[in-house]
Amino acid sequence: MAKQLRIIPEKCTGCIQCELACSFVQTGTFQPARSLIRVHLFDDQASYAPYACFQCDEAWCLTACPVNAITISAAAAKVVVPELCVGCGLCTIACPYGTVWYSPDTHKAVKCDLCAGDPACAHACPTGAIEYVDTPAADWLGPWAADLNQTHAEMRSGGGA
Ligand code: SF4
């Protein structure tokens, strides 16, 4: 069964341990600005809402990419393949949730990849505001991901698409 992040804003204290853990795993540095999960502060309510890629079934980032540089991992995360990404930024525009970013360091798109199935943000949160839980996968996801990954493998080997 696939798993996904479940965020419980009511438990969030705004400590940004999740952002620090994510940026360290992704870049080797503790820079919240490089985190792929972000904690939004609602000033008026003095409350916090962490948000990250929902790994949504529609995957507009994936379908918008003109060079098929976004694929689906074994953890059912939509992931950017850096070798294929040309940094055009269309996926960052297509994402309705604002959870695909352009990296000024690599000049590629970056997004949550669920840390290959062991998300650091969920481990780091001291209040249990981020859980990594089982979720039923859509029936079409497995075959679709397999086809897409095969296409990418052929592209990387210079053999097709
Ligand atoms: S680590 Fe947990 S409590 Fe801290 S900001 Fe992130 S979600 Fe909120």
Image: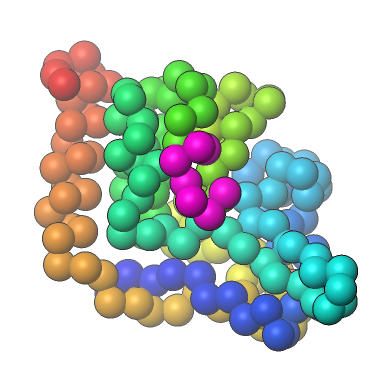
Q: Is residue 49 magenta?
A: no
Taking the spot 30% from the left edge, 39% from the top edge, the residue there is 63
Taking the spot 54% from the left edge, 43% from the top edge, the residue there is 100
Indicate whether 11 appears above or below 154: below
Q: Position of residue 131 (x, y in %)?
A: 56, 78
Taking the spot 63% from the left edge, 31% from the top edge, the residue there is 103
Please state which of residues 131 and 118 is positioned toward the viewer in this rendering: 131
Q: Position of residue 126 (x, y in %)?
A: 75, 78
Q: As drawn, which residue projects farthest toward the top?
A: 158
Kindly tell me whether residue 112 is visible in this rendering.
Answer: no
Q: Position of residue 46 (x, y in %)?
A: 87, 76
Q: As drawn, which residue projects farthest toward the front?
A: 44
Q: Which residues are magenta?
A: 92-98
Indicate whether 99 appears above or below 152: below
Please state which of residues 110 and 28 is positioned toward the viewer in this rendering: 110
Taking the spot 16% from the left edge, 21% from the top edge, the residue there is 161
